Amino acid sequence: MTLSFTGLSAFPLTPADAEGVVDVDALGRLVDRIARSAPDSIGLLGSTGIYAYLDRTERKRAVVAAVEAAGRVPVIVGVGALRSSRACDLARDAEAAGAAGLLLAPMSYTPLTQDEAEHHYRAVSGATGLPLCVYNNPGTTGFRFPPDLIGRLAALPRIAAIKMPLPADGDFAGELRTLRPLVPDSFAIGYSGDWGAAPALLAGGAAWYSVVAGLLPGPALRLTRAAQAGQADAAAALDAAFAPLWSLFRAHGSLRVMYVVAERLGLSVGDPPLPLRRPDASVAQEVEAALERLAVL
């Protein structure tokens, strides 16, 4: 099993009840469904996987179930936590359960300084032998990684990749030109934010860390492969088919919308962790229309 932090990484929801107890059977079915489409990796316990709402025991149960269901598809496990010691424990749990790599967001209550973030990543990346991807998600963590900090982290032995947000100006090529001289050639710079996947990959981004691939892995993989092959017209056509869903993601938050998508697909995922709630009934109708547009892919 080889993990390169490239291509399509599909992030499933984590089915759980109102008390945060993971339904490992339902999770296994979701992961098996993704694995049968053969993405490059599965991203467990990312933001879509509600990692921040689950305790250590439930996260450990989720990793065990997902790794078993994923078969030969590498599993990247989110290990974000408020304390460095807890993130290290989660990293060791993931390694023991057979994860292929780690994803670490700089969770905090008190905003982190750059020095604090760097020490956090040094500690967690040194806790296991697994490669680690930096999770740059300022929309949820409030922390932004400047280029010089990315360069320092990329120099650490086991930090192998970064999951970037979409650049505000849409200039993927410019951002990549800025970052690449600062990191080793082997360091993989990928992107999240599903509506930017096609331009990010066409510009040379290494990976698409995909929310939608957690439930619609086939169409997402076709978009990925077209963009990786430089087939701009084909990638644009596939992206256009996703456009109604992208609009719903931006309007309501991709996590909330994914619960509605799962429901329309007849998949058991439970409800969002309170206080998060599903969008209203009108959104379900829009999701249905968006899925009809994707049905031909």
Image (spheres, grey):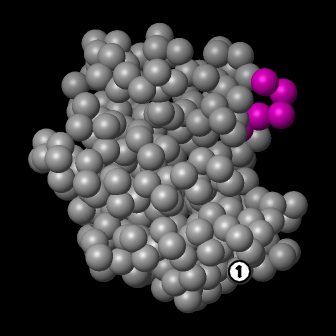
In the rendered view of the protein, which quadrant contains the C terminus?
Answer: bottom left
Q: Report the residue at 48% width, 58% height from top.
A: 244
- Can the viewer see residue 29? yes
Q: Is residue 171 above or below residue 148?
A: below
**Residue under numbered circle 1:** 270
Q: Is residue 5 above or below residue 242?
A: above
* Residue 84 percent location from the top left of the image: 70, 37
Bin the neighbour count of mark 1 within 10 Å (Cα to Cα): few under 14, some 14-19, many 20 and up. some
Start-end of magenta stretch: 107-111
Q: Is residue 96 above or below residue 18?
A: above
Q: Report the residue at 83% width, 76% height from top.
A: 18
**Secondary structure mostly taken by the magenta-highlighted segment of the chain:** loop
How many marks do you count on the picture? 1
- Can the viewer see residue 68? no
Answer with left or right where residue 261 lies relative to residue 106.
left
Between residues 80 and 87, which one lies in front from this camera angle?
80
**Location of residue 268 (image quadrant):** bottom right
Verify whether residue 128 appears in magenta. Answer: no
